Image (cartoon, rainbow, N blue to C red):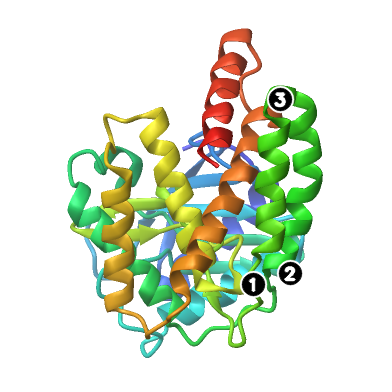
């Protein structure tokens, strides 16, 4: 095999892969070869590389094959936070894993801000939800309840005030882009600012971007990916973010999910059954849902990572207006 050298360089990459292999399979394991693919996904802003390995393991007569995922971070704090979280979840007494899977940490190279994880197979929830709608909705509610109950406290925190501050300049941008919708946008933001819930007294672990793009469907279980935005905060933030994404799916691809109210109710009912009683959950979820929709409207209108041809831009602007009017 001729490895495609990544940011670590050939020798450093091989050293990291070999070390991870020997920790996994024993000191006698031998790396036969590897190849790197850094173009297998266009999703997300972080550089991600998939590694395919061939190795010899003591007592096994044939070559074994492995597929791993490398993620490069700009700051070591971010890489360390994710590594610490995933390691804690994988601990034997970390949590009840029924209905939930996450990647495992194979190596963490602090000087290079590099994290090596297992590559998790599965079907994208965005694709599978049209076929297995009810089981997936139930599994998503169960997965979120499981995550939020974990006794893990990342150093990073998120709060409603942070979200309001983030949205304020976005509203100014959107009013300039959509002058006919300016009144609706300003009213939506004023309502959001007025109704902002207080920060939680006892923040929970929150995923930060729990939605179809970061979820796989495998053997009736949800595989949760990309913990880069994990933090301490209000569990309602994850639910609101998920519902905003499901609502958007009903607009963009109604053949995959047609009945948003039913989908929302199914996830929320499952979540409630597996969580502690929370009398103010509903209005908080609705608030985070509205906040997430406003942020998505801004991304639709101003993202530089999306196609910039006239037809694509017109389609995104039409979707943005639909989301604004939904407010």
- Residue at the spot 75% in from the left edge and 41% down from the top edge: 171
269 horizontally vs 237: left or right: left
Tell me if label 2 and label 1 are in contact, CB under 8 Å: yes
Q: Residues within 10 Å of mark 2 (few under 14, many from 20)?
A: some
The C terminus sits in image quarter: top right
Q: Secondary structure at mark 1?
A: helix
The residue carrying mark 3 is 178
Measure the C-alpha gap from mark 2 to mark 1. 6 Å
Q: Position of residue 27 (x, y in %)?
A: 44, 75
- C-alpha separation, residue under disc 3 versus residue under disc 1: 39 Å
Whichever of callouts 2 and 3 sits on the residue coming sooner in the sequence is: 2
* Residue 49 appears in the picture as rendered: yes
- Spatial CA distance of label 2 from label 3 is 38 Å
Towards the viewer: 257 or 4: 257
In the rendered image of this protein, does residue 312 appear above or below residue 75?
A: above
The picture places residue 29, in percent across and down from the top left corner, at 40, 67
Report the residue marked by disc 1.
Answer: 81
Front of the two marks 2 and 3: 3
Q: Residues within 10 Å of mark 1 (few under 14, many from 20)?
A: many
Secondary element under disc 2, as helix, strand or loop, is: helix
Residue 125 lies left or right of residue 114; in this view the side is: left
User: Residue 77 shows which numbered tag?
Assistant: 2
């Amino acid at each position: 095999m001729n490895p495609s050298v990544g940011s670590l360089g050939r020798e450093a990459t091989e050293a990291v892969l070999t070390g991870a292999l020997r920790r996994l399979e024993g000191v006698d394991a031998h790396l036969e070869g590897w190849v790197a693919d850094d173009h297998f996904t266009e999703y997300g802003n972080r550089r991600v590389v998939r590694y395919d390995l061939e190795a010899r393991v003591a007592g096994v007569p044939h070559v074994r094959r492995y597929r791993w995922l490398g993620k490069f971070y700009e700051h070591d704090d971010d890489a360390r936070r994710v590594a610490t979280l995933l390691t804690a979840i994988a601990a034997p007494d970390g949590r009840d894993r029924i209905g939930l899977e996450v990647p495992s940490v194979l190596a963490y190279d602090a000087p290079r801000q590099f994290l090596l994880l297992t590559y998790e197979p599965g079907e994208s929830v965005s694709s599978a939800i049209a076929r297995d709608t009810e089981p997936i909705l139930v599994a998503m509610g169960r997965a979120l309840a499981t995550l939020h109950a974990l006794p893990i406290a990342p150093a990073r925190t998120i709060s409603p005030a942070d979200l309001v501050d983030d949205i304020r300049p976005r509203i100014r941008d959107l009013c300039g882009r959509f002058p006919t919708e300016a009144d609706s946008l300003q009213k939506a933001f004023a309502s959001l600012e007025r109704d902002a819930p207080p920060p939680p007294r006892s923040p929970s672990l929150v995923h930060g971007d729990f939605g179809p793009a970061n979820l796989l469907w495998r053997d009736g279980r949800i595989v949760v990916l990309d913990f880069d935005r994990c933090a301490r905060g209000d569990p309602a933030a994850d639910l609101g973010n998920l519902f905003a994404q499901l609502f958007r799916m009903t607009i963009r691809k109604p053949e995959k999910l047609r009945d948003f109210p039913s989908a929302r109710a199914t996830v929320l009912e499952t979540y409630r059954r597996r969580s502690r009683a929370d009398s103010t959950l509903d209005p908080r979820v609705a608030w985070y849902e509205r906040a997430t929709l406003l942020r998505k409207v801004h991304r639709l209108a101003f993202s530089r990572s999306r196609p910039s041809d006239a037809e694509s831009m017109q389609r995104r602007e039409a979707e943005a207006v639909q989301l604004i009017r939904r407010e």
